[in-house]
Each structure stands twice: as C-alpha cells, then as structure tokens.
Image (spheres, grey):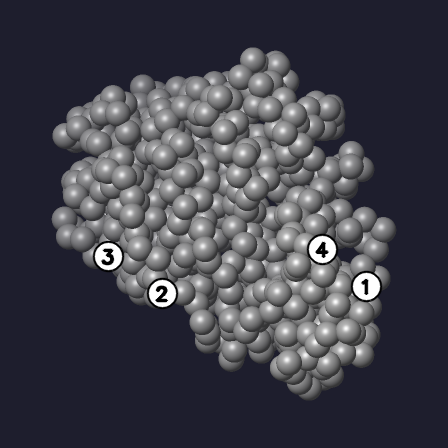
Amino acid sequence: MIMEKSLLQRRIDVASGRKPADCVIKNGRIIDVFNGDTYTGDIAIVDGFFAGIGSYEGKSEIDAAGKYVSPTFIDGHVHIESSMVRPSELAKILLLHGVTCIVADPHEIANVSGTKGIQYMIEQSNDLPFDFYFMMPSCVPATKFEHSGAVLNSEDLTPFYQNPRVLGLAEVMNFPAVSNTEEDMLQKLNDAIKHGKNIDGHAAGLTEQQLNVYMSAGIKTDHECTTAKEAKERLRKGMYLMIREGTVAKDLINLVPAINERNSRRCLFVTDDRHLDDIVSEGSIDHNVRLSIENGIPPLTAIQMATINAAECFGLKEHGAIAPGYRADFLLFDDLVSLQIHSVFKDGNLIVQNNQLINFPDNKECIMENDLKHSVNLHNITEKDLSIQIKNKLANIIEITPNSLITKRLIEPVYLNNGLFQFSERNDHIKLAVIERHHMTKQIGLGIVKGLGLQSGAIATTVAHDSHNLIIAGTNDQDMLIAAKEIKKMQGGLVVIQDGRTLASLPLPISGLMSTGTYNEVVDSLKRIDEALLTLGANRHFNPFLTLAFLALPVIPEIKLTDQGLFSVSSFMHISIDAVLPDNRMEIT
C-alpha cells in the first residue's frame, strides 16, 4: 500500500501525542499476538489505523470496560461460492462473527464461467467494509478426467496479478502435473513466483517424498491434513499448516495434538467450504477458535492462529494485530473461553454491536453477464441414460466417510433386475449420476453410493466440486429425472424430490452456484431443504448436499464419480463399475 505523505504525517503526529487521535479505546485488555499475553493501555486510532498504544487523548473515546480487545479474525482459505451467496452477503454474516478478512479461491465459479466468473467475484467484493483477497485458480479443470465449463491456462491468470487484492496461485491440486513438470503447470508456478506471489497447496494423501516435490515447486501451505502425523510432516517441511473446520471436512480436532508452543506460529485456521446455515448457527473462524480452546489449545495461541499467523502467511503486513501501523480492525469480548463477541470494528469504525450490523452499505446491485445467468445446458435425459448394467452382481461402490471429503472404495454385491442395478434400502445402495451441464456433451457418469441413507426420492445439485456438473442421487429413476428438469428450470441450485413432487429447492442462478437473494433468504431455503431431507430419510450425522457435492471431486482419495465415470484417485484413472473379487464367492443374502 502506498500512503500519501499527509496521512503518514498525521499518523506520526497522533503517535507522538502532538495531535489528538480520531478515536481512543480505553480500559481494554489488549491481546498481544506477538508475545501471547495481554496488557493495558489507551489505543489511539487515526484514519482507520492504529497509531499508538500508551496514554492518548482522542476526539472521541470508547470505554472497553475491561473487555478483551482482539484483532479481528482472518480465514486463510475459503471458497465464497460454498456459502451460496454473493460476496457482499457473505461479508455481512462473517462480520457478525468477527471475521473481517478472507483469502478466497474462486475456482468454483472459474470452473463454470472462466475468467468472467473470477472478474465477477472481484467486482462484487469491491467497496465493502470487508477485506476480500483472492488466489487465482490453479487447476481449471481440476483434472483432465472431467468436463468443466472453462479451461484456464497460465496466460489467462497472469493479468490478474496486477490487482493488489490478488495474492497468488490457489490450491495446486493436480500433483501429477507438478511432479511430471507439465508445461502449463510449470508456467503457472513460475508466473506466481516471478510476481512475488504466494502458492497454496492441496496435498491430500501425498507421501513425504511428494511433499518434497511440492515444497521445491514453491508451494508453502496445505489445508488437506486429516491426521496429526500428516500435520507434523508438513510443519517439519516448513509448510504453513492450514487447520480446516468446514461443513463436510472437520479436521480440527484430529490436528490439535500436533500443535504445541514451538510450532503454533506456523498454523492458521481455514474453513474451505462452509455452508451458510452452519456459519449462522456455529460461526466461522470464531468457531474454529472456540473449538481449539475446548480441545486444549491455549486461548491466546488460538487467537494468534486466527489473526497474525494468517496475516503473516500471506504477507498481509497491515492485518492481524493490535499494534501501531496496523489496520484498526478489532473486536471486543468478555472472556477467553466463550468468545461471545460484543462489538466489531472495521478500519476504526463500529460495524457490529450486540450481533447487529451497523453502517453496512445498501445491498450491492447484482449485475452479471448472460454467461453467468445461463450456465445449465442439459439434453433431455431418459431412464435409459440412468441405467446401470452390472455383469456379475459385484460392483465398485463409493462409501461416504461422515464429515470427511475422503471416500472408501467398496466391492459389494448389489440387487439386480434383468441385469440392471436396483436401489437397496437394506444395503444403503443408492444410484448416483454426474451429468455434464456446460456444453451439452450428453456425457453421464453413473455409480453407486453408500452412506447417504436415502429411503425414497432424489436430491440434486449443480454444486459439485470442482467442475460443477449436475450431480443426482436417488432411489428411483423417475424422481431423478424430475430433479434434473427442476435444476434446468432454475438454472442451477439444490432440489429435493419425492414421489414426483418438489419438496424443497434453492435456486442458484449465478453460474449455478450462488443465489441473487439475501443471506437470510438463503438460510430460510436451506431450513426447508433440511426438513425435506428428513422426509427422505437422509443421514442426519452430516450435511447430505455438501457431501454429495464432493463425491464428484477426483483429487480427494479414494474413489469419486465424474461425468466420465468412476474414478480411482490412487491410480488416477477411471475404473469400471463392475468388480471382481479374487475368490468371487460373495452372494446376495
């Protein structure tokens, strides 16, 4: 940031006490994220920045009345699209939870709408009392084994690096492209390094030697750890450990044992993918902080991880601390356990008080190009298109791991009728379809999923990471076909179907990923969807829609489904739905 000389002079004048501050915070217990303790003093603010801490007078004063004064929280890796609301609406709900800064990866909308989608996200996040930073999507599409709406090469991304809010290259999830030094991936990495930008990793299931490859390529972070052992390996390599607690991927409790007073400064919090209703009910990074404290992380260490650690990871030199020269982004709370937020200040201005937004700009107009409005292009799908023929009664099945992105590959006998797969409530075998929705290729991948728990009906969504084709899970073909028609009519969204009727739906007309409504309207729709899911008998121990969305992601072990068929992540190739056991003695009972 280049500061005008007059602003610099005013800041120095206030810091030296020659001129009064715009505002002074008195009687607060200041959280010192550098030393991990607290102290007292007057906090002087001028032009939206902290100018000094000590003894100061101001044009106005705020009595903190013994409350803790903490830096606001930073989310180090998040996909805005997973909230299903526009950036301006997400900012509103995050501010209520003490988050004033996020580092977003817009690769969801980029996979659908390319550079137009990225530009939309940047423009929609302008001129808000919230700091949106972006990393450029590195893998669009995530792999060559699926059809996305766009393909982004290095030359598509480089112009965005001129924007000061673009911090680097987002999660590099195509490890084979890095390891095999594929030309375009090398160019993307080199462009980021040449521009002095950060590079985020996605090291799901990587070995120690493969981590060496990542680090040598300039990749310095990972948010895919699921065990303490993996966390220690990344920290030992010098990586920043991103501790994720999202809606599906809940890894925080498993990673806490790896964190201690010697390595905690290399750890930060992320949400990655978090549904809006979970943010409303539980929180965002504030939830991560509270959960860490509950599981043994000292409160001041947890606050460090949510503030200065994230800022330093991304080189955000003006964020993350209550100290001279830092942005006056801070919050007040009464204790270091519940972290019940009393007030939130952005750039020195009160923006949240008693869980109410104050002085937030009027709703930002939702302007988007036709490409973003009309992104669901489907052919007429028939029952024949959804038929799964099994030759020997045994099938490769995707088993869900609750509250995890990781799936298991099972080989189990399935029920057949004239050689065609049939739904089994007893075995929890449900038909799964991924239908290409960008270019009318008529490509459909079919599979069987275990663990969703549906007893009737069908659910469908165009939120299907990362290529965001239409994904449908159902107990019968008729409801699956109606679900596809409803999605096409809405031009994207979520829908719950039973006995030919739509029980609940949420239109997402912005690239099939985001709503044009307010966050309250989306929350209300999600409540109706949750009620409808109970009618279908869906598993109550995790979010079925967000779980469904990740069943199409072919870079997370162990087995997934793309529009081209079943995909084995370990062998990085498509496999047949038919399966054969060595002894071939399993029978259907």
Report the amino acid beneath label 4: Ile
Q: Nearer the viewer, mark 4 or mark 2?
A: 2
Distance in Å between CA atoms under marks 4 and 2: 31 Å
CB under 8 Å between discs 2 and 3: no
Residues 510 and 532: in front is: 510
Report the amino acid beneath label 1: Gly
Distance in Å between CA atoms under marks 3 and 1: 48 Å
Q: Mark 4 or mark 2: which comes first in sequence?
A: 4
Q: Nearer the viewer, mark 1 or mark 4?
A: 4
Q: Mark 2 or mark 3: which comes first in sequence?
A: 2
Is 533 positioned to the left or the right of 45 in the image?
Answer: left
Residues 473 and 42: in front is: 42
- The x and y percentages for residue 139 are 50, 28
Q: Nearer the viewer, mark 3 or mark 1?
A: 1
Residue at image mark 1: 36
Is 168 positioned to the left or the right of 367 in the image?
Answer: right
* Residue 504 tag number: 3
Distance in Å between CA atoms under marks 2 and 3: 29 Å
